[in-house]
Amino acid sequence: MMKTSTYSRRQARADDRRCQRIVKRWRRDLARAERRQRAALRLRALPHWHELGQFLYVIGFLVEYELLRAGRGLLRFAALILRGVVDVLAALLQPLGEALPAASAAPGRRGRAARIIGAAAAAVCAAVFLLLVRAALGRRYLLRVEMNGQVLGYITNEQMLDTARAAVYERMDNARAVLEAAGQTPQDEEAVLSPTYTLAAADEPAMTQTELVNALLRATGGALQEATAVYVDGALWSVTNEGDHLRSFLQSLLAPYADVYDPDQRVEFLHSLELTDGLYYSDSVLPAEEVVQRLIGDETQPLQVCTIERSTYTEDIPYPSVSEESAAYEYGETIVLQAGQNGLREITQDTVAVDGVAREVRTISVQTLREPVTEQLVTGTQLKDYMRGERNGVSFIWPVPQYNHVSRWMGSGHKGADIAATQGTPILASAAGTVTTAYRWNGIRTQGDRNSYGNYVVIDHGGGYRTLYGHMTHFVVNVGDYVEQGQVIGYVGNTGYSFGAHCHFEMYDPNGRFSARAIFPNVPRYNR
């Protein structure tokens, strides 16, 4: 009974531990499932999550498929190699296998000797086979490229041939495009490249990509050749096979004009000349002498030499001015809040001269050395008390606050007040209203008609009130415009029947013309 009880307790503890492990595993699995569910919910909350999942699935499928294909290819290749080895061994050991049964049937020592000889022959055959395999594996195999029955060389892979053939076609297309852009057409038909390649053992070095391209070009039959294109002002002029000779000739034309002691001077041709080396069609290539004759004989004179003198100087940058109006100051008073300061800039220019005569000035660069400082001004708009008045509830202001003096008021034979001021002084609308007249003087000085007012403006203020402003240099309003009180309508001038710069100012009420002095009695004759 004691033994049974002890066993039962041990079994119970083991069952309890097993249950605890099962519960822990269940909890881990449950927690893992919950984490996966939360992750799936977060993924589904992302935009386009379904399309992303499909994309990842397709990528994974393609990767797995390609790996399986590669593995199958390697297995097939290994099987082919193993089968070839077995076939070779079978062919080599077949004579030995046929001889061994006959030799083993011989009695006594003769049979033992035959078996020894057979074993030695098998070992020799195996050694020879291993040497042959080692020698075959030690050989260097390349792709031999041929075209039109001519061996061009050896390359390491077929991709080199495809790339080189595309490069040759591209060069031929470029050469044809150069001639067609110049209005010429090459006589040679576009060559067709049909190189072939075979696997061969070779001890020669493999060609580089550049060497292969050059070999293919040579195999085209000389349709293209190395030459130098001459461009004048960006346009193809001609092609020569003596580029170095032409460069030396052009340099000799520039040398007499060059001043080696003046670093700011250089010489060049008046027309841009550019020599570009490359591959061009052979039928378009000319000798250097013929190219020179074409350049010299052209009417535009491409070989005309000019000197270019570079100079650098500084100049001021005018400062801007910003003005604000303020009623804290009297009308016309100007207060400088911030003084303006000119900036400074450095200008580099090239002066192009031909035979000592300047032809062109080219600005190369403009660099600001110092920024200008903006001038800030405040202009007063506050009128003096005596420049304000009213009549029957209609308010008026003095039309020329910056006047010098009143030469005369309205009186016998004179219909208004003459307000003298410097020519160009602003004239203000005495009251708000609509412009009914904006007369332009015809330039004839007459008396007693509307032309005698020169350039003048009439404003209707409503209720029978009107004002007239005459002898302006010019006005800045048009008939039908509505103007505010104090708005600039023109400038003091000396047009019409006038003998000095002034503004002729007339005022009207429902009863007719009246003197401005009735509204502005305290305006002093002289404005000091």
Image (tube, rainbow, N blue to C red):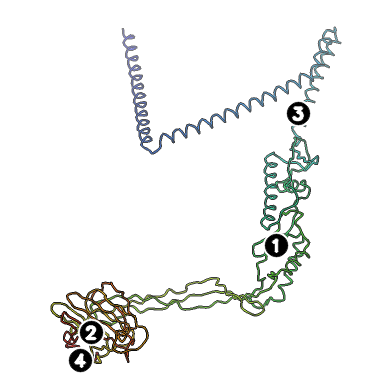
Q: CA distance from mark 2 to mark 4?
A: 12 Å
Q: Position of residue 514 (x, y in %)?
A: 18, 85
Q: Which quadrant of the rendered structure holds the C terminus?
A: bottom left
In the picture as drawn, the residue positioned furthest to the right comes out as: 110
Q: CA distance from mark 1 to mark 4?
A: 88 Å
Q: Residues within 10 Å of mark 2 (few under 14, many from 20)?
A: many
Kindly indicate the quadrant of the structure image that contains residue 404: bottom left
Q: Position of residue 503 (x, y in %)?
A: 28, 86
The numbered dot on residue 411 is: 4
Q: Secondary structure at mark 4?
A: loop
Q: Which residue is mark 3?
A: 133
Please name whichever residue, 478 or 399, is drawn nearer the observer in this view of the structure: 478
Q: Which residue is mark 1?
A: 237
Assess whether mark 1 and mark 2 are in contact (beta carbons under 8 angstroms). no
Q: Residues within 10 Å of mark 1 (few under 14, many from 20)?
A: some
Please name whichever residue, 11 or 91, is drawn nearer the observer in this view of the structure: 91
Q: Which residue is mark 2?
A: 506
Q: Earlier in the sequence, mark 2 or mark 1?
A: 1
Assess whether mark 4 and mark 1 are in contact (beta carbons under 8 angstroms). no
Assess whether mark 3 and mark 4 are in contact (beta carbons under 8 angstroms). no
Assess whether mark 3 and mark 2 are in contact (beta carbons under 8 angstroms). no
Q: Along the horizontal axis of the image, is 72 left or right of 385?
A: right
Q: Secondary structure at mark 3?
A: helix
